[in-house]
Image (cartoon, helix red, strand yellow):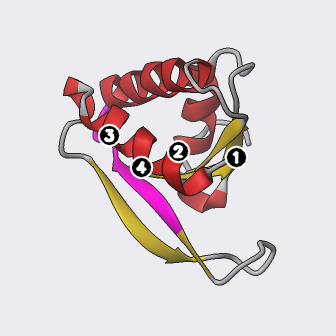
Amino acid sequence: MQALLRVHGDAAERELASLQEWLGRETALRGSVASEHRVIGPNEMGAVSDVLVAALGDGGAVAALAASLGTWLVTRRSRVKIKVTGPANRSVELDAKSTDVEALLRTVLREPGDGAAS
């Protein structure tokens, strides 16, 4: 499964680079997170956006991503949010106050048609 991560807030471009470096140090995620330019959707401002694309193979990778995102967010001095988008364009916005990040990620990252309620 694939997750798109966008950073919003103060110094978003710099914070996205910081997040990519942070996730690159996570053993369970090493080699599975890359930066891309993506066209922004019709309901969003702008034309293109830098995003991180995380290729997540198993439940352990989702747990590692959740733990790493939660820790990274609480270390930020600036106010930032991470929008995570998964299959079927389900998304969630995370910030330093987000609780149970793993459950939120599992909800948006589950594949369409897996039998779980939306």
Q: Tag 3: residue type?
A: Glu
Secondary structure state at the residue bearing disc 1: loop
Q: Earlier in the sequence, mark 4 or mark 1?
A: 1
According to the image, label 2 marks what residue?
Answer: 15
- Choose between 110 and 29: the one closer to the eye: 29
Q: Which residues are magenta?
A: 50-58
- The answer to whether residue 114 is magenta is no
Check if mark 3's residue and mark 4's residue have beta carbons within 8 Å: yes
Disc 1 or 3, which lies upstream in sequence?
1
The residue under the point 68% across, 22% down is: 96
Residue picked out by circle 4: 17
> Does 97 sit left or right of 104 as displayed?
right
Q: Amino acid at mark 4?
A: Ala
Name the spot of residue 26 as percent of width and height, x first: 27, 26
User: Does the CB distance between marks 1 and 2 fall below 8 Å?
Assistant: yes
Check the image and report above or below for 35 versus 75: below
Residue 107 is situated, as x and y percent measured from the top left of the image, at 62, 35
| Separation of marks 3 and 2 at Cα, in angstroms | 10 Å
- Identify the residue under disc 1: 10
Q: Position of residue 114 (x, y in %)?
A: 53, 43
First along the sequence among labels 1 and 2: 1
Which quadrant would residue 61 be assigned to in this image? Answer: top left
Of label 3 and label 2, which has the lower sequence position? 2
54 inside magenta stretch:
yes
What is the CA distance from the residue labelled 4 to the residue labelled 1? 13 Å
- Distance from Cα at disc 4 to Cα at disc 2: 5 Å
* Labelled disc at residue 21: 3
